[in-house]
Image (cartoon, coloured by chain):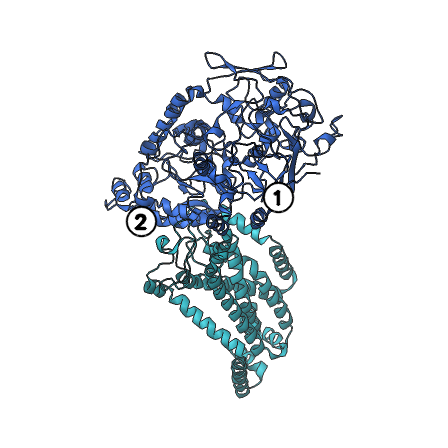
Chain colours: A blue, B cyan
């Protein structure tokens, strides 16, 4: 449900725009040494990075792992049937055959996908055998195994025939997946699924060798034994003794409390790969809990790049003002929206006029400043980030646009007057429903700073909120439990899992996705009275909860081979949500910031994972991994 | 009943005039000693000033025209990345990370810090003195029970409990326990009181244990005085000095406790200005490295307050019990 990725730090949000600018302007953002696009970057060296916390949600086991930082590493460690080029911007959202020899053959009813694998692609040491279609099928059998907790299994359950996520063991074959020979794999779907190819680019679907993985029956355990199917492998993979389950000891290259070290996979043939550059000889990611130290090491040259940690404002200030340092600051789109969500079954937000008034009054510029300005993102004018909608709504679409994005008191009050909660029609909410509203927030910057702005804005139209500042995970748990009936929340954001609007719409606005706990349809769009009673809540009398389920289905039927029509359909849905439903006050399309050191000769951003692209960056530090 | 009680009242000092003279002389002695203690006097003066500043906080808001939660983003934040601007003629202590007036917030912060300190210490003292006196005076099973309770409370993980309570009480607008506990000020006070009474109780228990064997208590008991009377009329006056001294020294540590809780994000919300919270806002994202005023001013006031309370506490201890010197 994207929540794991969404709860990861925001570091990645901002980069895309800057990269767009860079691409258009001849790579000006890529640093003095990285601007030359004509000659191939120098090979060799080690990409040395540090991160304050891996934040792994499933021990780095690809079957269940749902953290974007892991996705950036899987791009080097694994190959999927389909994959992106791990580059920035819209081009980085395009999907190509990787393990597959070609685009699949799709039946006319859109229910049968037949892939041929590239021949002679080998597993890394210690396996050294060819990767077969059965290895891919085994990955799906693992996804389908309940105890292994595939955290985004919902992309496959009920989609591929025979997959429901309830199997007890990965030995259970899946009826909808056929492997007639070692090079062929066929997927039979329950229903046409326009973005199915994108779902085959997720790391959980990368092949997994049964002879190793069968030894790991608990969620996350395989994480320390990941066998490489990609250009890099965990350092020391060749030392793994796979003669029996008991003989296997964790691979040295991954120490969950310290570091991950990748080295080149000797069995990898660059000729089979037209997606990745694979310039560096090694990749290291160390845990350094001191964020300041990470940035000072990057500046000193003892590290090559930050990963997901955001530079504190003073560091940002230094990089923005020092012309020598400025090229080392990279800001790319994180394909992520940050928003204030309002609960449709909780007064006063059960009234669309109040929700619209909240959109009109919000000082989005103030929130942006609290975040650190445009380096960290752009003001959101609708729900889905433009890059996800292929810009179908256009950059001037802003249904609640106000001067300087500071909020418009007159328009907000005009809207509020139409609400039943403004009894004396003065544009200020005067009902008891507008006071003492719990607003869940995170207890760290920039949310705590943004909170001051939000509280002050809402106060102008008579809505008084009580901020509750919680740790990030506690804040999510609180608002994801339907019966808590949290009226308004500032802590939530959503980043894409893969580049398709459905990766937003499905979990955020589809009424059928509402669940009692872990719910991410926070406004409860499309909540039925049956669902309400099931979750122990009730819909206020006289309130009808609109649903967009039919619109979602209509768009989801369009295959993404017809991207134009599909994106337009979702863009229209976003417009409808903004104007007729009003679930949120979207305020920021965030960017991810990466800071690189002087040793980086080519910076690249992986639009898929939202962080640096380890397979596309080059360094000249002459380091080696011993 | 009244006759023995009267006698008992005078008994320890054995004579009307002598008692009065002695009482006066000890009070004078105390005042004399305290006044001699220049550090304590300075502390007391600073505390009076701080109390006045706290009371006058709304006045400062009026004079400057800046409410404690008013945002002055255009004046006090840089346009590009929103860095706070420093002190100027309108914003004497500069602005904070969202453009609020640090001076006005520091003044309001005095209210929060002093309120928390006084209320939490008061509650802790009330619980601690009551339980400590009962334990010390009654002894036996009561003493065992209360002493074990003290041990249990002292072994609880304070911060984890605070974080847990803050989360649990965040769901409803009325907090939890029927509105008794709300995240923010009341929760902070409750947590501080909950974790500081045991030390007070221990101190009082120890003293009471010694006092109950003294002759004047024996005498009161033999004259038929009931336990509550003995505790309040006999023990309490004799315990007052250590209680006052300990409470005064507890106040600064409670102010720091509040600052620590707020610093860790389980204290008061941003809308309630507090020095601890202001320090934590200054530390967040290393903002103080470019906005020193965000840390300096609340830090100075916090330092002045805790130092003053400590000086006054030391002065009181010296003045009340010269033997402990």
Q: Which residue is mark 1?
A: A287
Q: Quadrant of the C terminus of chain B?
A: bottom right
Residue placed at 60% from the left, 19% from the top?
Answer: A137
Is any part of residue A90 visible from this angle? yes
Mark 2 or mark 1, which has the lower sequence index? 1
Q: Is residue A249 left or right of residue A552?
A: right
Say if B325 sits above or below A610 in the image: below
Is residue A381 depicted above or below B278 in this figure?
A: above
Measured as percent of width and height from the top left, residue A161 is found at: 53, 17
Q: Residues within 10 Å of mark 2 (few under 14, many from 20)?
A: some
Residue B178 in view (yes/no): no
Residue A285, x across and y down, in percent = 62, 40
Q: At which x and y percent is residue B282? A: 48, 56
Residue mark closest to the camera, 2 vs 1 = 1
Looking at the image, do the residues carrying marks 2 and 1 touch, with CB atoms under 8 Å apart? no
Q: Chain of mark 1?
A: A
Same chain? Circles 2 and 1: yes
Disc 1: CA contacts within 10 A as few (<14), some (14-19) or many (>=20): many
Residue A130 falls in image quadrant:
top right
Q: Is residue A8 left or right of residue A432?
A: right
């Amino acid at each position: 449900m994207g929540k794991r990725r969404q709860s990861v730090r925001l570091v990645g949000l901002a980069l895309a725009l800057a990269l767009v600018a860079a691409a258009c302007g001849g790579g000006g953002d890529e640093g003095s040494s990285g601007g030359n696009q004509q000659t191939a970057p120098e090979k060799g060296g080690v990409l040395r990075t540090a991160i304050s916390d891996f934040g792994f949600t499933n021990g780095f086991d690809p079957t269940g792992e749902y953290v974007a930082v892991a996705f950036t590493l899987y791009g080097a460690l694994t190959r999927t049937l389909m994959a992106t080029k791990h580059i920035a911007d819209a081009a980085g959202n395009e999907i190509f055959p990787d393990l597959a020899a070609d685009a699949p053959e799709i039946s006319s009813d859109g229910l049968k996908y037949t892939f041929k694998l590239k021949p002679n692609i080998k597993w890394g040491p210690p396996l050294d055998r060819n990767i077969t279609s059965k290895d891919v099928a085994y990955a799906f059998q693992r996804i389908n195994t309940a105890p292994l907790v595939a955290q985004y299994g919902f992309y496959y359950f009920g989609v591929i025939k025979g997959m429901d996520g309830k199997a007890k063991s990965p030995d259970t074959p899946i009826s909808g997946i056929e492997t007639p020979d070692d090079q062929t794999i066929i997927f039979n779907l329950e229903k046409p699924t326009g973005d199915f190819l994108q779902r085959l680019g997720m790391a959980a679907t990368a092949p997994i060798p049964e002879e190793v993985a069968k030894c790991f029956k608990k969620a996350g355990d395989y994480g320390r034994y990941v066998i490489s199917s990609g250009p890099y492998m965990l350092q020391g993979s060749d030392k793994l003794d796979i003669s029996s389950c008991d003989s296997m000891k964790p691979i040295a290259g991954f120490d969950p409390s310290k570091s991950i070290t990748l080295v080149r996979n000797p069995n990898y043939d660059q000729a089979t790969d037209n997606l990745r550059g694979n310039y560096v000889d090694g990749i290291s990611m160390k845990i350094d809990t001191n964020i300041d130290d990470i940035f000072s090491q990057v500046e000193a040259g003892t590290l090559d790049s930050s990963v997901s940690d955001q530079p504190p404002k003073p560091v940002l200030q230094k990089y923005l003002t020092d012309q020598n340092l400025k090229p080392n600051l990279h800001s790319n789109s994180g394909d992520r929206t940050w928003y204030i969500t309002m609960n449709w079954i909780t007064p006063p937000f059960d009234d669309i006029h109040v929700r619209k008034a909240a959109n009109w009054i919000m000082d989005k510029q103030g929130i942006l400043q609290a975040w650190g300005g445009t380096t960290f993102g752009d003001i959101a004018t609708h729900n889905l980030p433009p890059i996800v909608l292929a810009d179908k709504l256009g950059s001037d679409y802003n249904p609640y646009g106000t001067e300087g994005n500071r909020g418009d008191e007159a328009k907000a009050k005009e809207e509020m007057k139409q609400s039943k909660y403004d009894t004396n029609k003065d544009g200020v909410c005067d009902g008891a429903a507008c006071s003492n509203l719990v607003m869940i927030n995170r207890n760290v910057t920039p949310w705590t700073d943004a909170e001051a702005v939000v509280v002050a804005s809402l106060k102008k139209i008579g809505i008084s909120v009580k901020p509750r500042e919680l740790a990030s995970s506690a804040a999510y748990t609180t608002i994801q439990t339907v019966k808590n009936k949290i009226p308004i929340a500032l802590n939530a954001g959503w980043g894409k899992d893969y580049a398709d609007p459905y990766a937003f719409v499905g979990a955020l606005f589809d009424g059928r996705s509402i669940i009692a706990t872990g719910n991410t349809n926070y406004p409860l769009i499309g909540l039925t009275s049956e669902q309400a009673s099931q979750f122990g809540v009730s819909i206020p009398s006289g309130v009808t909860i609109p649903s967009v389920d039919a619109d979602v289905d209509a768009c989801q039927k369009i295959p993404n081979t017809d991207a134009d029509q599909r994106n337009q359909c979702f863009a229209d849905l976003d417009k409808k949500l903004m104007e007729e439903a009003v679930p949120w006050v979207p305020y920021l399309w965030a960017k991810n910031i990466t800071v690189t050191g002087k040793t980086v000769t080519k910076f690249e951003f992986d639009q898929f994972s939202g962080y640096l692209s380890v397979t596309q960056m080059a360094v000249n530090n002459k380091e080696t991994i011993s | 009943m009244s006759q023995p009680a009267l006698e008992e009242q005078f008994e320890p000092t054995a004579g009307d005039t002598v008692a009065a003279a002695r009482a006066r002389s000890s009070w004078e002695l105390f005042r004399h000693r305290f006044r001699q203690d220049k550090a304590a006097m300075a502390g007391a003066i600073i505390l009076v000033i701080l109390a006045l500043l706290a009371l006058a906080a709304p006045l400062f808001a009026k004079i400057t025209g800046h409410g404690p939660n008013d945002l002055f983003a255009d004046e006090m934040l840089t346009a590009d990345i929103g860095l706070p601007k420093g002190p100027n003629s309108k914003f004497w202590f500069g602005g904070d990370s969202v453009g609020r007036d640090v001076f006005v917030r520091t003044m309001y912060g005095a209210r929060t810090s002093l309120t928390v300190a006084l209320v939490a210490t008061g509650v802790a003292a009330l619980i601690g003195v009551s339980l400590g006196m009962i334990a010390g005076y009654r002894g036996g099973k009561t003493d065992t029970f209360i002493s074990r309770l003290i041990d249990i409370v002292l072994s609880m993980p304070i911060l984890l409990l605070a974080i847990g309570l803050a989360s649990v009480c965040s769901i409803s607008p009325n907090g939890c326990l029927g509105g008794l506990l709300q995240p923010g000020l009341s929760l902070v006070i409750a947590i501080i009181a909950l974790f500081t009474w045991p030390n007070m109780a221990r101190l009082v228990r120890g003293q009471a244990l010694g006092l109950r064997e003294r002759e004047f208590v024996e005498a009161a008991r033999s004259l038929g005085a009931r336990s509550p009377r003995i505790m309040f009329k006999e023990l309490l006056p004799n315990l007052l000095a250590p209680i006052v001294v300990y409470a005064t020294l507890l106040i600064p540590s409670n102010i720091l406790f509040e600052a620590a809780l707020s610093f860790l994000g389980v204290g008061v919300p941003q809308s309630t200005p507090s020095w601890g919270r202001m320090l934590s806002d200054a530390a967040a994202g290393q903002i103080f490295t470019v906005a020193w005023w965000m840390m300096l001013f609340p830090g100075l006031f916090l330092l002045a307050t805790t130092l003053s309370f400590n000086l006054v506490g030391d002065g009181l201890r010296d003045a009340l019990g010269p033997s402990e010197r």
